[in-house]
Image (cartoon, rainbow, N blue to C red):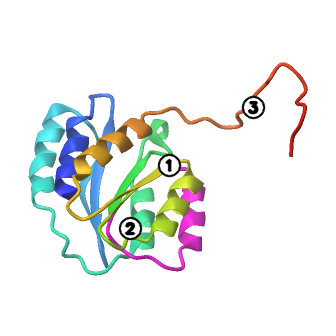
C-alpha cells in the first residue's frame, strides 16, 4: 500500500516540483537523489518504487529524518517538505521533533497500520508546520497521499493576525 501511495504522489507531480526518495528502517537508503520532477526522472523513479520492500529492520525515524534533512538542496529549495510514510512505533521523540523544527523542513506524516506512534507523528507534523493522517490496514493510502500532496502545495502562513474591525466584547 505504501508503493501505491508513492505512485499516486508521483502521478500528482508537475515539472515545477522537485523530489527525492529514501527508505529507512535500522538504516537509511537514499534511492533517488533530489531532482526536478521531469518526465525522464519520473520514469526512472517508477522501478525504484516498485522494488521497495520493508526489509531494513526497525523504525529508526530520528536517523532517517536527519539523513533526509541533510540531502543537498539548492538555496531556493531550503526547507523542503518531507512526506513520511511509516508503520513504526517511536518513543522518546522530543529531540527528534526539536531537530525537525530546527531543520526548516515541514513534515507531512502518514501513519500506516494498527500501531503507528500517533502522538509522536502528530507532534512532529504540527511542530514543523506539516500535517498528519492515519490509515488502517487495508485502507488505500493513495487517497491519503494525494491529500498530503495537496497540503504540501499550500502556502506557509506565519504570524497570522485577524483584524475584526472593532474591539472584542469578550476574550480569554
Q: How far across and how far down the image is residue 136, in percent?
A: 29, 62
- The residue carrying mark 1 is 130
Q: How far across and how far down the image is residue 138, in percent?
A: 20, 61
- The residue carrying mark 3 is 161
Inter-mark Cα distance, 2 to 1 = 17 Å
Magenta region: 86-104
- Please name the residue shown 15% across and 68% down the image: 53
Up-down relation of residue 63 to residue 14 (above or below): below
**Pointer 2 or 1: first along the chain:** 2
Tag 2 secondary structure: helix
Q: Is residue 99 magenta?
A: yes
* Residue nearest the viewer, comparing 3 with 170: 170
Foreground mark, 2 or 1?
1
Q: How far across and how far down the image is residue 37, in percent?
A: 25, 36
Say whether residue 162 is visible: yes
- Mark 1, other Cα within 10 Å: few <14 / some 14–19 / many ≥20: many
- The residue carrying mark 2 is 64
- Mark 3, other Cα within 10 Å: few <14 / some 14–19 / many ≥20: few
Q: Residue furthest top?
A: 165
Tag 1 secondary structure: loop
Q: Would residue 16 be found to the left or right of residue 101 on screen?
A: left
To which quarter of the image does residue 139 belong? bottom left
Up-down relation of residue 12 to residue 4 (above or below): above
Q: Residue furthest front?
A: 169
- Mark 2, other Cα within 10 Å: few <14 / some 14–19 / many ≥20: many
To which quarter of the image does residue 134 belong? bottom left
Q: Would residue 146 be found to the left or right of residue 75 on screen?
A: left
Tag 3 secondary structure: loop
Amino acid at each position: 500500500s505504501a508503493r501505491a501511495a508513492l505512485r499516486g504522489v508521483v502521478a500528482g507531480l508537475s515539472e515545477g516540483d522537485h523530489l527525492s526518495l529514501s527508505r529507512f528502517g535500522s538504516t537509511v537508503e537514499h534511492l533517488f537523489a533530489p531532482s526536478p520532477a521531469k518526465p525522464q526522472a519520473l520514469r526512472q523513479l517508477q522501478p525504484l518504487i516498485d522494488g521497495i520492500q520493508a526489509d531494513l529492520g526497525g523504525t529508526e525515524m530520528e536517523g532517517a529524518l536527519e539523513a533526509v534533512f541533510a540531502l543537498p538542496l539548492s538555496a531556493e529549495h531550503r526547507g523542503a517538505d518531507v512526506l513520511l510514510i511509516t508503520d513504526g512505533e517511536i518513543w522518546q521523540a522530543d529531540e527528534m521533533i526539536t531537530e525537525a523544527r530546527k531543520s526548516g523542513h515541514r513534515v507531512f506524516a502518514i501513519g500506516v497500520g494498527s500501531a503507528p506512534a500517533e502522538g509522536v507523528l502528530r507532534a512532529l507534523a504540527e511542530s514543523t508546520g506539516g500535517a498528519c493522517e492515519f490509515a488502517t490496514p487495508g485502507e488505500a493510502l493513495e487517497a491519503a497521499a494525494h491529500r498530503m500532496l495537496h497540503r504540501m502545495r499550500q502556502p506557509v502562513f506565519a504570524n497570522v493576525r485577524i483584524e475584526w474591525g472593532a474591539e472584542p466584547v469578550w476574550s480569554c
